[in-house]
Image: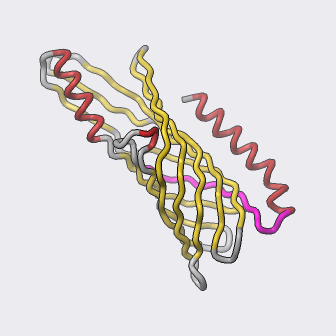
Amino acid sequence: MREVFKIFFASVSLVACSFTVAHAQEDTYVSFSSGVGLFDLSDADKELKGDLEDDTGSTATVNSDESAFIARAAIGTKESDNFSVEIGFFASSELDTEFNTKLGFNRTISSFAHGFDLVGKYHLANSNMAFKAGLHRSKIEMSSGGFEASHTGTGLLFGGEVDVSKDTFIGYDYYQDVGGESDGSFSFFYFGKRF
């Protein structure tokens, strides 16, 4: 997890250094957004629960976090009045899933996601709304005691933003197949600032 935050802060530093470029070129901007990500891990939980029940011969219960903090930093350029392109980096806080069997065997798996995305944004004429779609290259990392695993892959993302003022916005993005996993998708509700 520490490595992800090092990567995130390195990306923020890179974005901050690009801030000078953004002001030198009128059509380039930097944005930071943060909010809550809602994860649907039910399919993965069912699979792990089944494996645990098979291994222990006992029924298991599952308690899983469904939300995490997510932050995103991006550099964007306005290609026309209605279209812009962004390259961003995102990272989530940890999600914990607890498995407990009737025999007393307990396991907690911590996981988090991070990655890069490339997004095209279409700004509606005479409106403060924009729709976006793109691709992400992302990774899900999991750990439990000494066990560690990760999944890397590419997926789609789409969403929308509403400008609250000239420099602030709220939005919703859906990241599909994070880490290349069909059950790794999440919804991201956020507030952001553009520089």
- For the point 27% across and 41% down, the residue is 42
- For the point 53% across and 48% down, the residue is 136
In this rendering, would 189 be left or right of 105?
Answer: right
Residue 103 pos. (x, y %):
15, 16
- For the point 46% across and 28% down, the residue is 150
The span shown in magenta is: 25-37
Please tell me which residue lies in front, 159 or 17.
159
Please tell me which residue lies in front, 158 or 173.
158
Residue 139 pos. (x, y %):
50, 36
Residue 73 pos. (x, y %):
64, 50
- For the point 53% across and 39% down, the residue is 114
Looking at this view, name the residue that lies furthest to the right.
24
Residue 174 falls in image quadrant:
bottom left
Residue 72 pos. (x, y %):
59, 50
Q: Is residue 120 magenta?
A: no
Q: What is the tally of numbered marks visible in this picture?
A: 0
Q: Main secondary structure of the magenta part?
A: strand
In this rendering, would 31 be left or right of 68?
Answer: right
Looking at this view, name the residue that lies furthest to the bottom.
126
In this rendering, would 13 be left or right of 85?
Answer: right
Q: Is residue 33 magenta?
A: yes
